[in-house]
Structure formats: structure tokens, C-alpha cells
Amino acid sequence: MIEDDLTKSTAKAPNPSYGNNVRNVNTSGALNNNKAYNGNGSVVDYNSCQSKVGKSRNQRILSCKEQNSSSVRKNGETRKEDADILRDSSAIYSFSSLYHGLKMARRGVLWKYGPSSYSMNGLRNTLRLRESLLHGTYRIQDYQVFYIHEPKERRIVATRIKDRQFQRSLCDSYLYKAVTKSFIHDNCACQKGKGVDFALNRMDAHLHKFYRDYGQDGWYLKCDIHHYFAETAHETAKKVMRERIDNEAAYFHVCQIIDSFDEGDKKGIGLGSQVSQLIELAVLDKLDHFIKERLGIKHYIRYMDDFILLSKDKTVLKNALFMIEQHLVDLGLHLNRKTQLQPIGKGIEFLKWKFTLTPTGKVVRRMNRCSITRERRKVKRLELKLYKGEIEWKDLNSSVMSWRANALRGNCYKVVHKMDILCGGIHERYTQVKGTADTGAAARIAACQSRKREA
């Protein structure tokens, strides 16, 4: 449908119904009946670009960019870096890729005003974004900065919907494959098919394999980098990405994103951008290969800046710790006080879960005690809001059910049972006051109470 609109060449009076037609939109956003102008004032004849129907889509896009590049001349010749960017940009600047990026970026956030208003004119805004990329006028908008306090205080730098659209398109069309193809299997964060569940399951697998090889006796080294995102130098990040990216247009925009986080000290990558996640995964990729291939650590797993090494020999891990610290110094990073070397028999804490290897080889996965305490306090706060009328019972119940689903990842039957009893008392008191009941929750609570009486 978009291609059909682009090939129309009959001039018509300005009309909102033609808002998605390329030739009726200026980079300023105004609708007109003339040819669109680029950011430097030169005319862009899209009709001539689309006239050769026999050409492929990429060839037509390249012909448009060759015409637009006339505004980027120096002494009558195109600069080499500009020519490289124009040649390599066809994949990441395509309309279909950009619009797909919008559809992916707006998932789950359409209830917000910004994404919803931007998506109402999604085709037109995508066209404007593409034109700004082709003309070299694209600039990253100011970030939204806020703080989260659970489980600890973090500074989040959130991108605007337009920038999220382009970054999602950039990652899906080129950057993700180029950056992640060298990653080890146990690099678990922010990748397709991976995440917290994958990391927890891999930890189980490593402990089972370690038990089959060496039994329960062994040591683990847990490392955590101090302020990983905030301390990453921009020069280091650009060097790492230069080694992985051979597309000049993609590398130009990655550097643009890195520089957008500069606050005067030339370091720090914002936590909240999809591209920044890939950058930080890649910064420690050489360390992953060094540990696995040079140090010979067979059982190793990393989730962003948290990583764990398992070994039969304590001396091997001491030597590994020294080599890791030296490697991090070269990157301008260092380990924090949570780094520890302990016997495996004491249990391993990883991603808010504690893994215990029993003498029989069973791996017991329990939730962190602080997480349990925090949830119980949260439920009691929600109970007060429930009686004040600020929330409804379904809101409290959905919060608890979400926590239950997380708790059931591990061996937490008793913890979940106690939480059900706590919620059962809240539900019973609430129904007495309000005279209403949730049948699903009531059935679950009744079963919990019966199990309590049997115990």
C-alpha cells in the first residue's frame, strides 16, 4: 500500500487524506502539493526516483540517496565518509524496517500519551524520520531521566518514542546480529531467547555438571563490576563497536548514541536504551573469551556485569581474580565489594536467587530472603490502600499472582503457601467489610486454609 502511494505522480490539492504520500510532506511536517525539500534546501524529486519500476526497492532507495547526496559536496566531490554512509545505509533506512521498529517500540506503552499520539500518525512520522535520516538532519531528542528504587536506586535514561523507533529498527535490521555473533553461549542478558530464566537454568546446568565431574567440593568466584554503565568510557565503547560493525551508517549512529550520554566526563552509558544494552554486553565479550579460552574456566556464566566462575581448585580462582582485575583496569573499570570467593557448599547467590548444591547432587533454588520480606511489606501496604478505596481487590490479587509466578521458578513451596495465607486473611477481612468476593481467589485461599489445618 505504501509503495502504491509513493508511485503516484498526479498533483492534487493539499488534502489530509494524502498525508502519507511522500511528495506531499516537507521535513517541517507541512503538507503541500510541491516536491519535498531536504534540510539543506535542495529539491528531492521522489517521482524520478520511483520512475524506474523495474528496479528493486533497495536500488530505488539508493538512487534517491545519490540524488540527495548532491547537497553534501566539498570542492565538487563527495567526501569519502559521506559516500560510505550513503552506500551502507539502505538496510537501516528502509521504510518497512523503520515502521516495524515503531510497532515493536510501542508495545505495552500505548497507554502513555507520547507513544499513543506519535502512533496515531505513525506512517507520517515514520516518513519524516526516514527523510531526516536520508538528509542527515536526524538528531536524538532530550532524554527522560528518572530513578527507580527497587531493588536498589538506579538512574534510568529513557529515550523518546521516535528515537526508540529508530534504535529498534537499527538493532533488528543490522546491529543485533553484527554485535552478538561473537558472544559465548553463557552471556545471558538482553538477547533473543535469553534472559533471567535462561540464566537461572544455565546456573542449574553448570552446578549439575560440576557435581558429576568433581562432586560437591569446590569453590566459586562471584564478581560484580562497580557502576558498570556509569563508568564505561565512551572511547572504550566506540572501540569495541568499531571492531564489530562494518556498516558505516550504523557505526555513525552508534557513536551518535554514545555521545548523547556525555555529561562532560566522556564516560557513562545510559541505562534504558536498547543500543546501550548491546554496547555493554559487547564491552566484556573479550573478557568472556579470555576466561573460557585462556584461563580454561569450564563453568562460567555472566548476566551483564554479574558473573560467576566455578572450579575445583581455589588457587585457580585466585589467579583468575587477579587476571580479571588487570583486564578490567585496561577498560577503566573495577570490581566492587560484592566480589567474593567462597566454597560452593555455602550456596551461591545469583540474580536474587540462592543456589544450593546438596550432597546427593540436587540443586535447590530458593528466593532471596530480602525479596520475600519486601513482597510481604508491599502486600501490607496494598491492604491499607484497599481499605482506603485507592485500589480494588483485583489489583492486589494480580500483584500477588505476579510474585507467585516468579517464586514458582524455584523450590519455594512453603514461601508461596505462607504468602497465600497472608492474602487469605486480607481477602476474608475485605469481604466482611465490602460484602464482595473474588471466587477464584476465594477458592485458592480456602485450599490454603485447609492445608494449614491439616498441618
Image: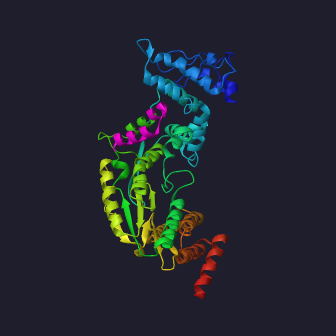
Q: Is residue 66 above or below residue 98?
A: above
| Image point (58%, 44%), residue name | 104
Give 5 or 75, whichever is nearer the viewer: 75
Residue at 53% x, 74% y is 412
Tally of marks: 0
In the rendered image, which quarter is residue 354 located in? bottom left
Front residue of 43 and 253? 253
Q: Can residue 121 be seen in this snapshot?
A: no
Q: Quarter of the image holding residue 241?
A: top left
Residue 257 position by quadrant: top left
Q: Position of residue 180 (x, y in %)?
A: 50, 46
Residue 241, magenta (yes or no): yes
Magenta region, main secondary structure: helix
Q: Which residues are magenta?
A: 233-252
| Residue 267 horizontal/vertical position (percent) | 33, 43
Q: Reply above or below: 175 against 14.
A: below
Question: Can you say whether 174 is above or below 409 in the image?
Answer: above
Q: How is the image coloured?
A: rainbow
Quarter of the figure that contains the C terminus: bottom right
Residue 386, x across and y down, in percent: 53, 66
Residue in front for this viewpoint, 156 or 174: 174
Q: Position of residue 396 (x, y in %)?
A: 55, 65
Residue beneath the point at 53% across and 78% down: 414
Most distant residue in the top direction: 76
Q: Quadrant of the N terminus?
A: top right
Whether residue 67 is visible here, answered yes or no, is yes
